Amino acid sequence: MKKIMLLLAYFTVCNLTYSQVDKVDNAIKDLMQKNRIIGLQLAVIKDNVIVKTSHYGLASVEDSIAVDSQTIFSINSITKAFTGVAIMQLVENGKLNLDEPISKYLDKLPKTWQNITVKQIVTHQSGLPEIWDSQGNMLSENSETLFQKIKELPLIFKPGKEFRDSQANYLILGMLIEKISGQSFEKFITENQYKKAGMKNSIKAGIGDFYNIIKHSAKPYSYFRNNILTNVYQPIPSNLYPAGGIYSTGTEMAQWVIALQSNQLINAENLNTLWTPIRLGNGEIYQENGFLNQSSIGFYSSSRVKKPVIASLGGNRNALYIYPKDNVSVVILTNLVGSRPENFIEDIANLYLTEKK
């Protein structure tokens, strides 16, 4: 009788597990159909263990190549979270002080930039000019020319007085990382994050833009042209790779989250600094409208008290949500620009957040 009871308990657990998997897979498939998503990778973490990884759809429509567990995706602006961690790693190693002016570390800066602090750069309170012209075009696709043009423009506000998310800040953060470490941005991320998190496919993919030929990668698509599916090509100057140049897989992104939360990348104190909402010069927390209404170093967060969430978004097609109180995280990577998984990622997360422990 005891053996029978044990077998019944085992099969009950298995059935619940399969039921959970079915719910997740069915939800993803429905969401993909509703949002016309071409290809998608999913990874779910609970209590610092990856409990679900799946892949769906096509990596290449033209060649009918399916997404698999090794398919590489551009994570776009989720790269900024890696850059934020890199900055805190330099702080932790005593090589960088957030309160020091950037002129202590970088040479040949405009006079108006001399007293801007690292903290003002990393919290988007620097007032640095935009990298776009009045028509929304990038000032230059060449790294050196882009930086030169930015330096010739006036600050858009007095440092420390406002908040404005600017790609130019990430250009400076990349320069700081390279100057202080003596390594390229890619080498620093590889040595200090990829290797520590076991991200072998990310190492092979390297860091670049949509023009890079990356083996086993998902092609990016959109419906932006007349609501018809087309390819997407987006050049990124190499000095803006810290804002959007990383390629990875859903599983390896989950490995990175586990490494981050288990203090393999930075200690608990610096992780808290990384995730603490930005405060303006008057001491008030900066807030916008919408769900993810607060910002921190490389991340967003919600002021929601119940089930707080820390997030990173990329390219209107990728989303990472971390629920620190529940120790649950969800990664969704897609190859459809405009799929906006932040609009449905909580539907998946709730299947795990509401699950009884």
Image (tube, rainbow, N blue to C red):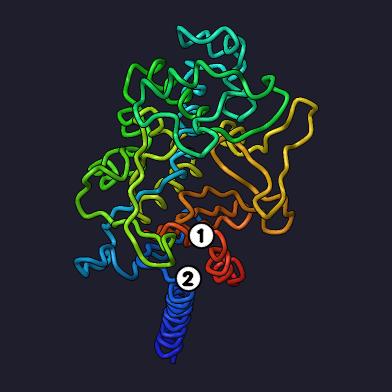
- Could you tell me which residue is drawn at 21 percent across and 70 percent down? 64
Picture layout, residue 118 above or below residue 336: above
Classify the position of the C terminus by image quarter: bottom right
Which residue corresponds to the image point at 22% horizontal and 47% vertical from the top-left?
Answer: 214
Q: How many marks?
A: 2
**Foreground residue, 48 or 199?**
199
Q: Residues within 10 Å of mark 1 (few under 14, many from 20)?
A: many
Sequence order check, earlier mark of 2 and 1: 2
User: Given contact means CB atoms under 8 Å apart, are the residues at marks 2 and 1 in contact?
Assistant: yes
Front in this rendered view, residue 136 or 28: 136
Residue beneath label 1, please? 340
Q: Residue at x 57, y 7 (%)?
A: 111
Q: Residues within 10 Å of mark 2 (few under 14, many from 20)?
A: some
**Distance (Cα) linking label 2 and label 1:** 9 Å
Q: Which residue lies under the disc numbered 2?
A: 35
Please state if 213 lies on the left or on the right of 307 as rendered.
left
Q: Residue 28: where, in percent of width, then height? A: 45, 72
**Helix, strand, or loop for circle 2?**
helix
Q: Position of residue 230 (x, y in %)?
A: 34, 61
* Location of residue 228 with respect to 91 vertically, above or below: below
Q: Which of the pair 153/312 is nearer the observer?
A: 153
